[in-house]
Amino acid sequence: MGREKESVALLMQDEEIVLPDDLDYFTYIARLMNAKSDRVHGLSTEEKIRLSEARPGTLAAAKRLEGITPVGILELIRYSTKASNLLRK
């Protein structure tokens, strides 16, 4: 139940999260997340295509795109949090 509450809280903060204009959804996220391939767990190929075509400026805009799942949004939140933490170092 704790993880579910955490996920809901993350989804509620989406209005504040900005996505970079030049974000490459196919490779950059995977490299930032230290993945061993370009596949990001939870972000499907369809979601990567839709996000690349739409280029949403915020997580709220990404959330409104057809075909983007709650799990995909959570992956973008995790990416944004990790990217933000890396930039602060």
Image (spheres, rainbow, N blue to C red):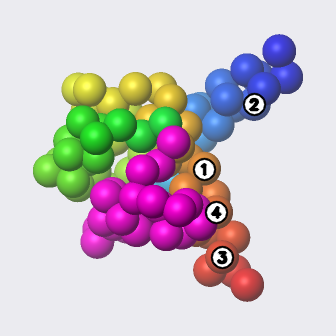
Q: Tag 1: Cα neighbours inside 10 Å, few (<14), some, or many (≥20)?
A: some
Identify the residue at horizontal 20%, vertical 45% (top origin): 49
Nearest the viewer among 37 and 84 is 37
Q: Position of residue 28 (x, y in %)?
A: 40, 68
Q: Amino acid at mark 1?
A: Arg
Residue numbers of the magenta segment: 20-41
Residues at discs 1 and 3 in contact (Cβ within 8 Å): no
Q: Which residue is mark 3?
A: 86
Helix, strand or loop at mark 3: helix
Using the numbered discs, state the Cα–Cα distance from disc 2 to disc 3 in whole angstroms: 22 Å
Q: Amino acid at mark 4?
A: Lys
Using the numbered discs, state the Cα–Cα distance from disc 4 to disc 3 in whole angstroms: 6 Å
Q: Quadrant of residue 84?
A: bottom right
Residue 31 sits above or below residue 50 on the image: below
Residues at discs 4 and 3 in contact (Cβ within 8 Å): yes
Q: Quadrant of the C terminus?
A: bottom right
Q: Earlier in the sequence, mark 2 or mark 4?
A: 2
- Is 35 included in the stretch rendered in magenta? yes
Residues at discs 1 and 4 in contact (Cβ within 8 Å): yes
Q: Which residue is mark 4?
A: 82
Tag shown at residue 6: 2
Residue 72 sits above or below residue 2 on the image: below
Q: Amino acid at mark 3?
A: Leu
Tag shown at residue 78: 1
Q: Amino acid at mark 2?
A: Glu
**As drawn, is 55 to the left or to the right of 88?**
left
Identify the residue at horizontal 75%, vertical 30% (top origin): 6
**As drawn, is 56 to the left or to the right of 12?**
left
Helix, strand or loop at mark 4: helix
- Is 37 included in the stretch rendered in magenta? yes
Q: Quadrant of residue 9?
A: top right
